[in-house]
Amino acid sequence: MTVTTASARTEEPAGSPSRGTDTRQRATRRRRAVAVTFVLPALLLLGALVVYPVLFSVGRSFFDAGGSRFVGGGNYAEAFRAPATLKAIRNSTIWIVVAPTVLTGLGLILAVLVEKVRWATAFKLLLFLPMAVSFLAAGIIFRLAYEENPDKGVLNAAAVGVHDAFEDSAAYPSARARDGQGLTKGSDGSYATSDTVSPGGTTVLGLVGVAPKDVPSQAESAFPAAAREAAGTELRGVVYLDFAPGGGGEQGKVDKAESGLPEMSVEAVRDGTTVARATTAADGSFSFKDLDPGAYTVRLPAANFAPPYEGVSWLGPALVTPAIIGAYLWIWTGFAMVLIGAGLASLPRDTLEAARVDGATEWQVFRKITVPLLAPILTVVFVTLVINVMKVFDLVYIIAPGPVQEDATVLATQMWLVSFGGGNNQGLGSALGVLLLLLVIPAMVFNVRRFRRSQS
């Protein structure tokens, strides 16, 4: 009887606590195994594509260009001595200071204004569309937009249009005088008669270099005007195209088939001082009346031959970095606006309305209530853009032409150029990559910590 009781005590009932604990432990192990099974491919990819390249780059940065000789911190020292690297650091600093600040400000302003627009959704979609364009495509678009030739670059076409609307361009930028035909070119680009002329006399000023298609439509034959004589205190002359379509004629003499050059400025100069001005008529004729007796030089000012306004050299050494930053702003403004707009939509409206009821203006509401409440969102947007700006590569490499590539280079492009773009120094390139990583890590850590705090 006693034995039976003892054996019965060793068998635990089905619902005992120990058996339930074992079941839960087995279930937990199964869930962990399933989780590891699903996470393992991602971990392998992360290790192969991120961890291994980072560790390899760190190790490679301590070796020479060929990878066979250990140089210690030599590559890092060389990175800070090379003028190109210093310029890349300077440009990267400009990017970090300017682009995130301007984008965050633009995003905030647009997010606030969009709330007051009737078609807010369509407006947001329009501004967010550039995010769907790859950096490669955006670079090609802006490379074409920044073309210096106004016939190709839309920005310079607009600049030339605005300039010409307020200031007349030169009448004949390609015109020039024939050698030995009575006109001498001055150091400022003007042309003056070699011999002096007195009142009562006439002079003919022949020019070449003007294509027939560039001759104004109102131009008339210069032959009758050249035949007219001056009288008394008048000094007459004619400016004409010393070229007859189809050939023929005599150089330095006005022929019947040769046309005058209208709308050209002419000056009468005496003792180095301009005493009279005139503008040529449709037949190229001009006249100075009531001149004092004496000898005069007839001059065609340089303004007649100034090259046309070609716009702004957007991709020159001085403006290439701001121009590329402009392309970056076009792409990322919608991103900043949407994120800040989401934060703005979550603001307590009661607080804003209470401030307005108390007499606060819209500017005061924006500055003292909206901006402080949006500070966490603005910080996240700013830090995210800083991280993105540090590794910008595509736009700089595509938009900047070869001759100014070094003037626009940033750390990412310099790393590529040193390693694969002709430098063939993977040791120095790895050092630049490690430097770039060290600069990005603090911003990433800050963003992650702030995100965790916002979730708690």
Image: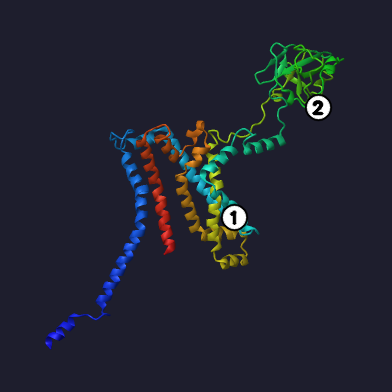
**Vertical order, 130 against 352 (above or below):** above
Quadrant in which residue 265 is drawn: top right
**Residue holding disc 1:** 124
> Please, which residue is most extreme toward the bottom here?
1
Please name the amino acid that badge 1 sits on. Answer: Lys
Question: Where in the figure is residue 202, as x and y percent of width and height?
Answer: 81, 14
Question: Where in the figure is residue 438, as x and y percent of width and height?
Answer: 38, 46
**Vertical order, 106 against 26 (above or below):** above
Disc 2 on helix, strand or loop?
loop
**Residue holding disc 2:** 218
Report the quarter where the C terminus lies: bottom left
Quadrant in which residue 144 is drawn: top right
Q: How far apart are marks 2 and 1 (CA)?
A: 52 Å
Mark closer to the chain start, 2 or 1: 1
How many neighbours does mark 1 have within 10 angstroms: few (below 14), some (14-19), or many (20 or more)?
some
Please name the amino acid that badge 2 sits on. Answer: Gln
> Please, which residue is most extreme toward the left here?
2
Question: Where in the figure is residue 49, as x and y percent of width and height?
Answer: 37, 47
Question: Where in the figure is residue 402, as x and y percent of width and height?
Answer: 50, 32
Report the quarter where the N terminus lies: bottom left
Query: Could you tell me if residue 325 is visible in this image?
Result: no
Disc 1 on helix, strand or loop?
helix
How many neighbours does mark 2 have within 10 angstroms: few (below 14), some (14-19), or many (20 or more)?
few
